[in-house]
Image (cartoon, rainbow, N blue to C red):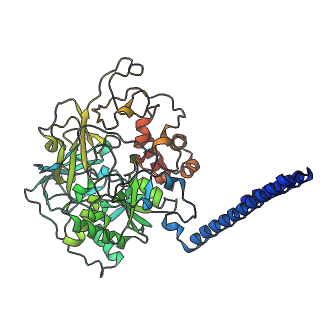
Amino acid sequence: MKNGITKASLLLLFLFTAQFSFAQGGESGGNNLFSVALIAIAILLVLAVVILVGDNLLALEAKRTGVSEKGGNVSIFPKWSEIFRPKMPSHVDAKETTVLKKGHDILLAGVADPEVIETANVTRYALQPKNFRGLAPIPKVVVEVGDTVKAGDQLFYDKSMPDVSFGAPVSGEVIAVNRGEKRSIAEIVILADKEIQYKDLGKVDLEKTSREDLVKHLMASGAWNLFRQRPYDVVADPAEVPDNIFVSTFDTAPLAPDSNILVAGREAAFQKGIDTLAKLTRGKVHLGLDGRADTPPSAAFTNAANAETHWFHGKHPAGNVGVQIHHIAPISPSTKVWTLSVQDVISLGMIIGEGKYDTSRVIALAGSEVSNPRYIRTYAGANIEELVKGGLKSENVRIISGDVLSGKKKTQEEFLDFYDDQITVIKEGDYYELFGWLLPLAPRPSVSGTFPNFLYPSLRFKVDTNTHGEKRAFVMTGQYEKVLPMDIYPQHLMKSIIVNDFERMEGLGLQELIEEDVALCEFVCTSKQPLQEILREGLDYMREQA
């Protein structure tokens, strides 16, 4: 504001000097005209200064009263982002929407049919300790092969958190305790009952229950693993009280399931879960809403009580909860926040409202190599072979638990990861493409201008796992910053992780990220660097040093 006043004063001085020089010429007619123009300009400048001062005072008052923290524009003048906002669907409040200009949507063939939701005939389920970060590699298993369990019965616990029970996702007989590298526990396999039996946890009256008693109840329920804590994306520490809790109600990853389908018929359980989360945090429960789709989000999301809703509009990764946290309440070194998925919130609501640990899931079976892409009702940790049985177009395929960007490669003998709600099947790219870098013959999703993808923006691609190039020098390209809608420099961060520069890692925002947030950066990477793997090494290193 001072700079504006100084410039106005200099301009007035210049005009008066010019007017005096002009008057010395003796041209009285021109002098009168110039005087009128000078007075008009002076009045306009005074008005401009008054308006600028008023705008600054308004901003200061808004900051003092906390109005500016609630978002929105408190200035007299509209922002450029408001003038050039993209067209929003009719059900979206454009003024309350965070518009993300960075990102990239990857359109793939094999979208799950929303009209087809079948019940899977799966007999084997597994709880995999490696799905839960922050635990010791060898937890204490409390069941043996041949034992009979109910859904919610304890299968194992971590030695650093002995009061936290990890419960069975289904009822049945324990048929295997499989081990992985260095004798770690890979999975505890259960042959499920035809009708699931639940451990009676007892219903909870949230109004009469203290937070301490609620935490103890959830730790004993077998479902504490529903809560993931950031930074580091680990199982939440029961001793911590989260500053905020975040739930993204939409997913923008390739072939991701529609959350409206996931919550349909279970709206009451979702609301009960939100009520529970509100009791667990010292701050707020934040729900990220989809501001892109023509179909409005479920009323369970938009009308949720005890939660604050936020609209987001943009390309992937707009649906990532990490991106939403960054634009709502960024994580600092002293901040602890929890995150859950929509179906995690539903499971939480079932524990509180029905007194049972219900891990039932609706998952999307999608991808170009699936004969009939569809939605399937099952439970957490379902056997993949039984889920995809007879539904694949060929044998030479890559089965992924999750999406193609951040999911994990699986064999048919393995099990769906606990937090995943989709299985993606694409062709295996085990071939060489002669001069592929020089003669790109087949269309493929890309941010490069080599392919004229802008000519067919709605085309869905059939893809495979071929990377179309090998790992090469890690050069500065600026590609990552174009697809990550966060105030972070990913390439500088990755290089600081590689050299174990703790201070630079922390200063460059490592604690705000997890693998899914940089998965798109890995997709566009010219150097073919394993960014998700590098990021996890950095997160683990920082966590060890903390």
The location of residue 149, given as percent across then percent down, is 15, 60
Q: Height in image: 123 above or below 473?
A: below
Residue 540 shows up from this direction: yes
Give the farthest residue toward the left: 194
In the image, 2 versus 44, the foreground residue is 44
Q: Height in image: 435 above or below 367?
A: above
Q: Height in image: 272 above or below 135?
A: below
Q: How many marks?
A: 0
The location of residue 509, given as percent across then percent down, is 52, 51
Give the farthest residue toward the bottom: 208
User: From the viewer's perspective, is 263 left or right of 283?
Assistant: left
Image quarter of the N terminus: bottom right
In the image, 28 versus 22, the foreground residue is 28
Residue 223 shows up from this direction: no
The location of residue 345, given as percent across then percent down, is 28, 63
Residue occupying the point 52% across, 59% down: 333
Q: Height in image: 344 above or below 369?
A: below
Give the farthest residue toward the front: 29
